[in-house]
Amino acid sequence: MNVLIIGSGGREHSLAWAIAASPLLGELFCAPGNGGTATLASNVALDASDHKAIVEFCHDRSIDLVVVGPEAPLVAGLADDLMAAGIKVFGPSKAAAQLEGSKAFTKTLCRDNDIPTAAYAHVSSAGEAKAYVAQCGAPIVVKADGLAAGKGVFVAQTVDEANNAIDICFSGEFGEAGAEVVIEDCLVGEEASYFALTDGKSILPLATAQDHKRIFDGDEGPNTGGMGAHSPAPVMTDAMCTRVMDEIIRPTVDAMAHAGTPYVGVLYAGLMIADEGPQLIEYNVRFGDPECQVLMMRLRSDLLPALVATADGQLANFDLRWRDDKALTVVLATQGYPGDYEKGSVIRRLDEAGSDGNVEIFHAGTKLQDGRTLACGGRVLNVTARGKTVGEARTRAYEAIKQIDWPEGYWRTDIGWRAIEREESPS
């Protein structure tokens, strides 16, 4: 099979790494890819927003499957245009991608189907939003309704902070994404991520993970796209996973099918695990980044047939095998991220750092130029390791990082801290 992966991040490199191991694979392409995917696939200069060019490329190169990594092309309807052209695609339709593209859409779905989530209001003016905040008080969460590149969510500890967040959303900073706002109760508990494949009818559970969103150690500082992750999430016991499937995932898949917009692809539920059980924070319509990296490190089965079975509606009798090992990834970012940062610094000694068989280095914001690896983004590398415990995986990841020569880089030193505390002091 010839496969095209859309995207340029660490998620796409880890998907390319997994797909490249499949005996079913013919040619592998990444658009646009990065310095890491260039070692596994042919990078092609396609713009994800140019659906016509992508369709033409797929016909020219006899592409059998397109795997769409990021959310924006899915929300823009890339999967629809590919399917209309007779090209098989892994990823939901534009209508189904509303689960991530509109927070109000998902909140309404939860309300109508008794899916546990935070109480909320959906407003279209700053005045409405501030009146609701005055009524509810703080802490409270303010979210731009649409896609805002991970920057449209504000956890406000005071009413003043909430009002400032409302002003930012309605100021036009997020464009159309901030034209409407969802304000919701601040849930208390432990966050976790749950992943499943679905072909619109059948559901295949994948694995769980925990992300570290804040830029600094101790979960301090502004939110980022993710500074590290580990899998599985200890809080996601077998009993809790069953509840998530029964109370959240299955009702969602059934509701989407009933509405005539079946969801096909990977469904990523961001959860808050509270004393009373799981509650949905948000849905993502693609693999997480950096969660995908730890999932791929734990996956023992061939990924490619699973993606094809999902696209073909053949998941009913499909299964996947997972390693018992834990996996952990540490994101190396350019100093200054998530604010302003310089591009073009040279990264050295990556081969030495990745020499351990239990370590993989997935690239994100990199490019290869004149035989050198250059940093060209905010989140640049994902140093990912396996181990019998989260602690062992973390030790391997940080040992590998010590070998990387990149003075312009920054990373957190405490990824996996909550899971390691559990390992060291089991209750």
Image (cartoon, rainbow, N blue to C red):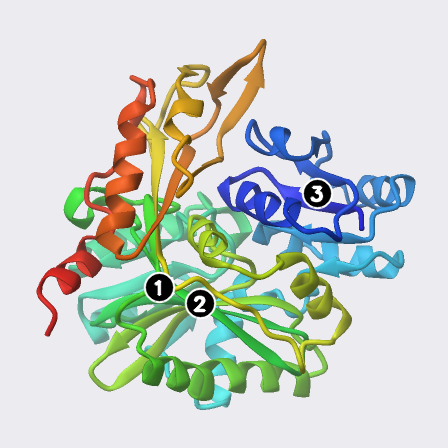
Q: Nearer the viewer, mark 3 or mark 2?
A: 2
The image position of residue 186, as x and y in percent, is 24, 69
User: Which residue type carries mark 2?
Assistant: Ala
Graded by Cα atoms within 10 Å as few (under 14), some (14 to 19) or many (20 or more), the crowding at tag 2 reads: many
From this view, report whether residue 206 is shown above or below residue 73.
below
From this view, report whether residue 35 is shown above or below residue 158.
above
User: Which residue type carries mark 1?
Assistant: Pro
| Image point (24%, 66%), residue name | 140
Q: Is residue 9 left or right of residue 335?
A: right
The image position of residue 380, as x and y in percent, is 43, 31
**Outermost residue to the top:** 370
| Image point (34%, 52%), residue name | 229
Kindly state the secondary structure of the residue where label 2 is placed. strand
Q: Which mark is residue 232?
A: 1
- Identify residue for label 3: 49
The image position of residue 62, as x and y in percent, is 88, 45
